[in-house]
Image (cartoon, rainbow, N blue to C red):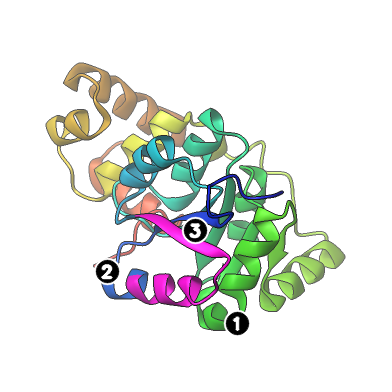
Amino acid sequence: MTPTNPENKIRVLLAEDHTLVRQGFRRILEDDARITVVGEASTGLAAVRQTKELKPQVVVMDLSMPELGGLEASAEILKELPNTKILILSMYSNDAYVRKAFEIGAKGYILKNAIEVDLTRAVIALAEGGAYMSPGVSNVVIESLRAGSFEDTSQDAYERLTLREREVLQLIAQGKSNKEIAVLLSISVNTVAVHRAHVMEALGLHRTAELVLYAVKRGLVVPQ
């Protein structure tokens, strides 16, 4: 795919919650004359908003983002802008994370410990219509396929939650009140309460503490 901006550069949005890390990624990418970083986001919700506004060709998305996780934010972006290329960054090569990333429509998955080697290559590959995985990720996928562990997750209760319910679950786990969640998601407090009740029922949980523990185990939030 040929970049469509006047300078014929690949337009990239960086979504990473740590400012210094994000600045490092920017320097790596803009060392290549073919790439320009058009925006930066420090939360999943901000990444969704900025992608809709700036319409980059490639979104470099950290897996663990505050307010809305990287996978959920990516799904929201692709729902409205299906031609956007999503590149997931992660510390984890776990096959469950990799599978979910590609299920929601990501085209690339690279490990942070290989960022200097893989980041520019991956962005260019995705902009040209291809896909990219760090060698460490590729090996995990191959071994999982051989072992038959790249299983169908259709019976997983979490997979049956709507995107909005997943957003509410993550924000609850981050300690947000119903009122704070309502403001962040631009919905009413009553709607948040309904989503909260449905999430708890769907997951078979009864207390907020159980929701938090569940979210941590799923990797939706990082324990402080």
| Mark identifier at residue 143 | none
Q: Residue type at mark 1: give it.
A: Val
Q: Earlier in the sequence, mark 3 or mark 2?
A: 2
Label 1 to label 2: alpha-carbon separation: 21 Å
Residue drawn at (65%, 54%) of the image = 127
Secondary structure beneath disc 2? helix
With respect to residue 86, does 192 lie above or below? above
The disc label shown at residue 19, or none: 2
In this rendering, position of residue 105 left or right of residue 179: right
Question: Residues under labels 3 and 1: Cα distance?
Answer: 15 Å
Evaluate if marks 1 and 2 touch, with contact meaning CB atoms under 8 Å apart: no
Inspect the image, locate mark 2, and give the three-letter code of the amino acid beneath it: Thr
Name the quadrant of the C terminus: bottom left
Tell which of 201 and 181 is nearer to you. 181
Dot label at residue 117 = 1
- Magenta segment boundaries in residue numbering: 23-39
Q: In this view, does 91 lie above or below 108?
A: below
Q: Any magenta on residue 33?
A: yes
Is residue 84 in sight in this rendering? yes
Mark 1 burial class by Cα count in 10 Å: few <14, some 14-19, many 20+? few
What residue is drawn where x is 53% and y is 64%?
35
Q: Which amino acid does label 3 sit on?
A: Val
- x and y, in percent, of residue 58 in the image: 55, 52
In the figure, is residue 194 to the left or right of 24? left
* Residue that mark 3 sits on: 60
Q: Residue furthest front?
A: 6
Contact between labelled residues 1 and 3, with CB atoms less than 8 Å apart:
no
Answer with mark 3 or mark 1, whichever residue precedes in sequence: 3
Q: Residue at x 36, y 32 (%)?
A: 200
Mark 1 element type? helix
Image quadrant where residue 147 sits:
bottom right
